[in-house]
Image (cartoon, rainbow, N blue to C red):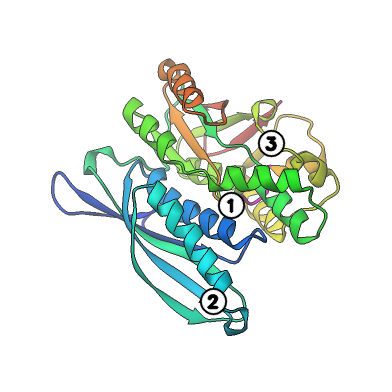
C-alpha cells in the first residue's frame, strides 16, 4: 500500500502475520512554546500509524534549524517530541538535522500491523455511522496566535487537543471492527472526508450541529482569521461538497480549516456505533457521532 491510493501511510507486507507501516510528517512551529511544538509535531506524525489501525514502534527525528537560534530552544523541541514518543511507547532511534532559516520538526515513524487488520481510508459502507474524535478549530486558533490576537486560554485548549495521541481511539476502533478510518489534518474535515469517498459508491452525510469546536474557534472564524490553507482546501475539495444546510460563509469555511494533529474520523456499523462512542467517551476522548454513510457517488453532503 503506497502510491496507488491516498492513504495515511505506506504498508509493506513481511509475511502472513506482519506488515510494516511507514510514514513521515514535519512542519514549522504552530505555537510559540518550543516544548509544546515538539510534542504536537510528534503526536501528529504518530497519528498516521494510528489512522491505519497500527501500533508505532520507532521513530527518527527530522530537524531543520537556524544556527542563530542556539541549542536551548532546539533541546526543548526535541524534549517535547521525545516525551510524547515515550508516552506512545515509541523509541526515537536517531535522526537527521539540517541548517535552515526556519525551524521545522517532525518524525519518520515505523509501525507494525497484522495484514488482515489494516484500516484504510476507503471501506465505508452504506448504513455506517461516522464518529469523529477531538474538537476542530486548531487552524483558526493557531493563526490567531500568529496574529497576536488569540486568548491564552484558547491557545492552551488547542495545545492540549493537538498534543493528545490518537492511540486509544485507534485501538478501540480496531477492536470493534471499524470499516474505514483517517486522521483529520491539513486537508480539514471536508478534505479528508472527500478522500474517503472518492471513487466509491457512497456519500458521507455530515451534520454540522454535531461537531465539537475548540473554545474561541468560532469567534476567530467570524473575524475571518483563517490560515491560507483554508482557501486552498475549499478551492479544490468543494467540487465534491453539497450544501444541504444554509450555513453562513464563516461556518462553511471552518469545515475547510486545516487541522494540526486532529482526531480520527471512523466509519463503523450503526449497530456498533453507540458502543464505540461510549468506549471513546469513557476513555476521555472528545467524541461525536457526526453523520452517516449512504449509497451515492463520492459526495460529501452537509446537513444542519
Question: Which stretch is magenta?
Answer: 255-260
**Furthest-right residue in this view:** 223
- Is 183 in front, or is 26? 26
First in sequence, mark 2 or 1: give its number.
Answer: 2
Question: Could you tell me how far apart the alpha carbons at marks 3 and 1 are, in whole angstroms?
Answer: 14 Å
- Assign the magenta stretch its main secondary structure: loop
Q: Mark 1: few, some, or many residues within 10 Å (few <14, many ≥20)?
A: many
* Disc 3 target residue: 213
* Disc 2 target residue: 71
Q: Which SS class for mark 2?
A: helix
Residue 258 lies within the magenta run: yes
Question: Could you tell me how far apart the alpha carbons at marks 3 and 2 are, in whole angstroms?
Answer: 36 Å
* Disc 1 target residue: 260
Q: With 68 as the anchor, is 220 left or right in this view?
A: right
Question: Could you tell me how far apart the alpha carbons at marks 2 and 1 are, in whole angstroms?
Answer: 25 Å
Residue 274 in the image: x percent, y percent?
Answer: 47, 17
Residue 284 in the image: x percent, y percent?
Answer: 51, 29
Q: Is residue 28 above or below residue 128?
A: below
First in sequence, mark 3 or 1: give its number.
Answer: 3
Is there CB contact under 8 Å for labels 3 and 2?
no
Q: Which SS class for mark 1?
A: loop
Residue lying at 46% horizontally and 33% vertically, measured from the top left: 266
Q: Mark 2: few, some, or many residues within 10 Å (few <14, many ≥20)?
A: few
- Is 269 in front, or is 288? 288
Residue 271 lies within the magenta run: no
**Quadrant including the C terminus:** top right
Q: Can residue 7 be seen from the camera position used here? A: no
Q: Mark 3: few, some, or many residues within 10 Å (few <14, many ≥20)?
A: some
Q: Which SS class for mark 3?
A: loop
Residue 268 in the image: x percent, y percent?
Answer: 42, 26
Q: With 252 as the anchor, is 165 left or right in this view?
A: left
Q: Is residue 179 above or below residue 255?
A: above
Amino acid at each position: 500500500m503506497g502510491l496507488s491510493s491516498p492513504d495515511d501511510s505506506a504498508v509493506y507486507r513481511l509475511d502472513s502475520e506482519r506488515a510494516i507501516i511507514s510514514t513521515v510528517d514535519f512542519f514549522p512551529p504552530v505555537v510559540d512554546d518550543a516544548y509544546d511544538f515538539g510534542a504536537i509535531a510528534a503526536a501528529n506524525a504518530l497519528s498516521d500509524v494510528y489512522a491505519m489501525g497500527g501500533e508505532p514502534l520507532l521513530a527518527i527525528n527530522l530537524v531543520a534549524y537556524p544556527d542563530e537560534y542556539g541549542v536551548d530552544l532546539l533541546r526543548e523541541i526535541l524534549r517535547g517530541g521525545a516525551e510524547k514518543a515515550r508516552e506512545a511507547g515509541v523509541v526515537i532511534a536517531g535522526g537527521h538535522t539540517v541548517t535552515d532559516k526556519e525551524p521545522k520538526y517532525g518524525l519518520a515513524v515505523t509501525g507494525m500491523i497484522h495484514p488482515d487488520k489494516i484500516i484504510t481510508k476507503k471501506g465505508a459502507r452504506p448504513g455506517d455511522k461516522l464518529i469523529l474524535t477531538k474538537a476542530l478549530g486548531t487552524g483558526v486558533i493557531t493563526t490567531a496566535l500568529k496574529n497576536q490576537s488569540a486568548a491564552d486560554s484558547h491557545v492552551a485548549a488547542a495545545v492540549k487537543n493537538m498534543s493528545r495521541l490518537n492511540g486509544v481511539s485507534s485501538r478501540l476502533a480496531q477492536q470493534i471492527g471499524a470499516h474505514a478510518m483517517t486522521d483529520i489534518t491539513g486537508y480539514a474535515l471536508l478534505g479528508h472526508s472527500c478522500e474517503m469517498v472518492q471513487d466509491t459508491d457512497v456519500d458521507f452525510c455530515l451534520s454540522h450541529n454535531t461537531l465539537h469546536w475548540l473554545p474561541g474557534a468560532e469567534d476567530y472564524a467570524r473575524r475571518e482569521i483563517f490560515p491560507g490553507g483554508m482557501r486552498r482546501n475549499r478551492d479544490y475539495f468543494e467540487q465534491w461538497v453539497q450544501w444541504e444546510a444554509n450555513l453562513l460563509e464563516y461556518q462553511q469555511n471552518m469545515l475547510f480549516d486545516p487541522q494540526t494533529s486532529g482526531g480520527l474520523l471512523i466509519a463503523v456499523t450503526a449497530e456498533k456505533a453507540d458502543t464505540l462512542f461510549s468506549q471513546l467517551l469513557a476513555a476521555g476522548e472528545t467524541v461525536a457521532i457526526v453523520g452517516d454513510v449512504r449509497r451515492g457517488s463520492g459526495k460529501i453532503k452537509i446537513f444542519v
